Amino acid sequence: MIETIYYEKQISKHPRTLETFTRFPKAIKIPCDHFKEIFNPSSQNFRLQKKKPALILAQNSGKLIHSVPSTYGIGGKVNYYFSHMLNCIYDCRYCFLQGMYPSAHYLLFVNYEDFFAEIEKKAQKFSPEPSWFFSGYDCDSLALESLTGFVKSALSFFECNPKAQLELRTKSVSTKILEESPPLPNVVTAFSFTPQEISDSVENGVPSVMSRIHAMVRLADKGWKLGVRFDPIIDCIDFEKRYQNLIHEIFDQLPVESIHSVSLGPFRLPEPFFKRIEKLYPKEAIFAGNMEKRGKSISYRREIEHERINTCKKLIVERIPPHKLFLCETENQKKI
């Protein structure tokens, strides 16, 4: 899968670097002084790199833990996100990553121990109030577990730090590490969904809706807490019918007691990211019409956004207790 590995010289002897080299013995290995030499040049072709991304191994020496946006809508009183990896194995047309980063290469920060040390500091600072830490902002938390071993490391850490709450967000069905581990009360695995017809059109490489549901059922049977994320909600023909079918497919099979939370988030992108992605896909229907600028973001017109979210909200509260439903708002959005 990986044919080329770039690595920072300073982490050439790091155990995860050496382990990665062993896992890909035939890969070409190229040293560099800093990952930005490979990842940051603006002249790169994201779409071309996406066809065969390289792997970059680096150490994140900057800020490791970030406060979530005020519109995030889910979590507790104290909420952070972190990114042990940048870029994703999947190729969703609406994904902000292709508007944010000049490169499609996988950038893996091998210094997990530094991330966990910062998480422990934050959790202790706000204890006994639980602190939430969200993984899956800049990558899929599970899809490349066989390469990264991140979830395995995270489970060991969070088992010893019960006041730190972890969400693993994913579209993957690579749940083996979770199925083989005892469930932790402070870890939620959250799966993202759009109707299958939309997924087929704009979520290239993503496992089918039904295979993701089956993965959730397997985890529920093992006792894991689960999240369901309808984010982004994509407007489409026969919207109510398609989302009704999706919601029924999910909640007909998942036991309610296994569901930690459900969130609804409208399609939204920062304006600069939207413009870059629109240039990549000038004929893509999801970027055409019914959009408006609101604050610093591009999203559906307010009336369409409210109608679509309210439609989903009504369908969902028929299946779960209302306190488990969270709304992720766009900038300047009125309360629904």
Image (cartoon, rainbow, N blue to C red):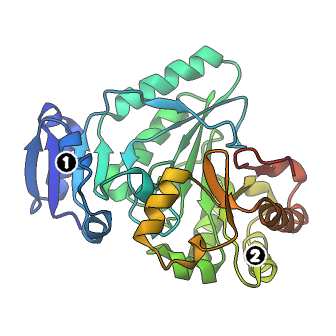
Quarter-wise, where is residue 103 in the image?
A: bottom left
Residue 236: where, in percent of width, then height?
70, 78
* Element marked by disc 1: helix
Residue 311 is situated, as x and y percent measured from the top left of the image, at: 85, 68
Where disc 2 sits, the SS reads helix
In this figure, which residue is indicated by the disc labeled 1? Answer: 38
Q: Is residue 8 above or below residue 194?
A: above
The numbered disc on residue 309 is: none
Residue 78 shows up from this direction: yes
What residue is at 91 percent from the left and 66 percent from the top?
A: 318
Which of marks 2 and 1 precedes in the sequence?
A: 1
Q: Which residue is mark 2?
A: 243
Q: Is 258 rendered above or below residue 251?
A: above
Q: CA distance from mark 1 to mark 2?
A: 41 Å
Looking at the rendered image, the quarter that the N terminus falls into is: bottom left
Name which residue lies at 19% across and 48% down: 38
- Along the viewing direction, whichever of 302 and 138 lies nearer the viewer: 302
| Amino acid type, residue under disc 2 in the picture | Tyr
Q: Is residue 302 left or right of residue 209?
A: right
Q: Is residue 180 visible?
A: no
Q: Residues within 10 Å of mark 1 (few under 14, many from 20)?
A: some
